[in-house]
Image: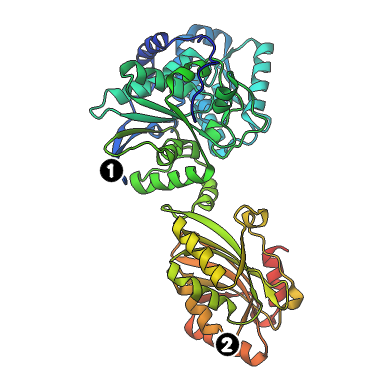
Amino acid sequence: MKLNRSDVKPRAINVSDLFHEVMMARTRIYRLFPPTPLEIHSMPGDWRMLLKREDLSEIHSFKWRGAFNFISARALEAQTRGIVTASAGNHAQGVAKSAALLQIKAHIFMPKSAPKLKVESVARLGGRLVEIHQTGDSYSDAAQAAEGFCLTGGQLYVPPYNDLMVMAGQGVLADEMMTCPERPDMVFVQIGGGGLAAGVAGVLKSYDRNIEVIGVEAEGQASMTAAFKAGHPVPLEQVDIFCDGTAVKTAGNLTYPLLSTLLDDLITVSAKEVSAAVEEMWRVARVLPEPSGAMGLAAARKSKRNLANKNVGVILSGANLDFRRLSLIAKNLGDPTGHQAFYQVTMPERRGTMLAFFKAIKPIGLNISYLMVGQVDTDIAYPVMGFEGMDRQFSSLEETMKKAGYEFKDVSDRPDITFRLAPFQPKLFKLPYAAILNFPERPGALTEFLERIASLANISYFNYVHSGEEVGRALAVFSFESKAKRDDFLFDLKANGPFFTDLAGDTNQALGLTETFIGL
């Protein structure tokens, strides 16, 4: 976005003071951990990614830097009063580690939605010195509770981002980047409340004003973007927590004026773009960041800047990923070189129509990532198909469907597609047979199967989602005009595959089992 600097208020912190505190912070920071590595990876498009591995600290995040610098700088006060903080996870771990090392009693407030992995890590790092309070549904709720606790008990509050000492601690990682032989030409830096970005930008611009610093926010939590538009920090009504490490409702009133003068640009990335960046980091560097940890790479990929022959700094800010979230990240992924779209197509409800459709679109070369069929009418079928490919391929798909006379519509954002709901009318199923089919994940496998059974069976229900495995699983129900065709179908299935799991068994209760399996 274009930055509007006309409404920027006088800064409470100037860059020279920030840089001085970063230099002072180095004497404290390295008591806890040594510098983290800076890896160099050659990327498609002829640019080099300078990957700052903040995930390799003991808490697997950069947040320990600001927390430890703040507490160390006020150690006597902290030991006398005790400390309190609020965090969705990574800052909490930094405070817990610092409390254990400096022998300070800490109360840490975390939202009830905080990932279990992070809550457990806080307890492990802090031990007996840390008491965890889980309250509210968001970081803002937890922060409000923590501030109220401080007012009552008189403890020292450890801010997660909106403080000079916290910014200085985070800024040490940028100082480490500048001491490496390969210096960055530009750096993409995550923004939650702005502490990391302010520290990094202040250091980089102090060393070299020509280094571009691009801030990165996630959609649904872009509090700094809102501040730039309003001319001052404003609270968001709702905060998306897909990138939970940067989910902050209001930008800092100290970080905002700094960033309004230091950033060269501010980019917003989607959950889908972040998920693709997580996958790319795994492919390129064999590292698995939490979503907020991949925001820098997502922005580099989205940026319209010319990256060719440039050293591009990307901060892997954290890797405290709840393993169960991988399914959500994978769900957001399409083809890494293109995108994914879902279409509902109208076609006659009779044998062979699905096969004819696949044959018609085969030359386009799209990958089928999703197929959902549920019989709801005796004459017309409304299958939903997901495809992965390039923009030009989707244009060809729509043109092909129009020429072939198919009615269709893009349903990519429809809620029933998001939640994988397939409506169907069980009373329309004839002599049904239900099974889980295991198709080899290769182009043409499904079409070959449909071609084999075209004269025997009608598809009454079919639910397939690409999972990234070598085998693609589909829940299917087939209907038949006669028992003889049903018997022939089963003979062919057993003889020629694919491998299947019979859901009906000897009782032949396919319909009831299918309803139970789908949960309808």
Q: Are marks 2 and 1 in contact (CB under 8 Å)?
A: no
Where is 2 relative to 288, above or below?
above
Q: What amino acid type should be assigned to the residue bearing mark 2?
A: Ser
Place of residue 37 in the rendered image (x, y in percent of width and height, measured from the top left): 31, 31
Instruction: Please tell me which residue is depicted at 63% across the width and 59% down the height of the picture.
Output: 420
Q: Which mark is residue 179?
A: none
Where is 290 relative to 512, above or below?
above
- State the residue position of label 2: 455
Instruction: Please tell me which residue is depicted at 33% across the width and 37% down the height of the picture.
Output: 307
Tell which of 444 and 63 is nearer to you: 444
Place of residue 497 in the rendered image (x, y in percent of width and height, measured from the top left): 49, 80
Numbered disc 2: secondary structure: loop
340 left or right of 517 in image: left
* The C terminus - image quarter: bottom right
160 left or right of 428 in image: left
- State the residue position of label 1: 46
Tell which of 182 and 468 is nearer to you: 182
The quarter of the displayed image where residue 310 is located:
top left
